[in-house]
Amino acid sequence: MNTPISASPIASHPAAGRQRTGHRALCAVLLASASLWGLSGCVVAPLPQRQVVVSPGPVYAAPAPAPVYVAPSYASPGVGWVWVANPRHGWGWHHHQHGWHRGWR
């Protein structure tokens, strides 16, 4: 009783081959969607920059510093006068109500 060995019933099943190709197709779709998701993004080109010309403003020259102390050349004009340095004229007598002695402004 020699009967020929036939193929196994599982291998001859029509869905057996489709399952493997379906798995490959699923992997391909997943790989494609993952790479599309990973490589997608919003690319924005930077705006062209305007050239900015900076013009130097007026050059500021600081005035020469006043001497530390200069002794008065004449006596105080009266009570309330203080010997202080004037930024324009130098040292002189100043009163809090009358201003500078000898008309300095």
Image (cartoon, helix red, strand yellow):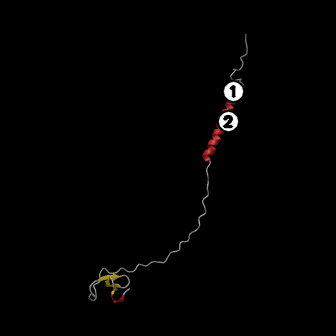
Residue 94 lies left or right of residue 11; in this view the side is left
Query: In the rendering, at what x and y percent does residue 27 appear?
Result: 64, 36
Where residue 65 appears, as percent x and y from the top left, is: 36, 79
Amino acid type, label 1: Ala
How many numbered circles are shown?
2
Q: Residue furthest front?
A: 97
Quarter assignment of residue 100? bottom left
**Labels 2 and 1: the sequence-earlier one:** 1
In the picture of the structure, the residue carrying the numbered disc 2 is 25
Name the image quarter holding the C terminus.
bottom left
**Residue shown at 56%/69% (left/top)?**
52
**Label drawn at residue 24:** none
Determine whether, in the image, residue 64 is placed left or right of residue 4.
Answer: left
Q: Which structural element holds mark 1? A: helix
Question: Does 46 sit above or below residue 57?
Answer: above
- Type of amino acid at the residue the image marks with label 2: Ala
- Residues under labels 2 and 1: Cα distance? 15 Å
Question: Residue shown at 66%/39% (left/top)?
Answer: 29
Provide the residue designation for mark 1. 16
Q: Residue at x 66, y 36 (%)?
A: 26
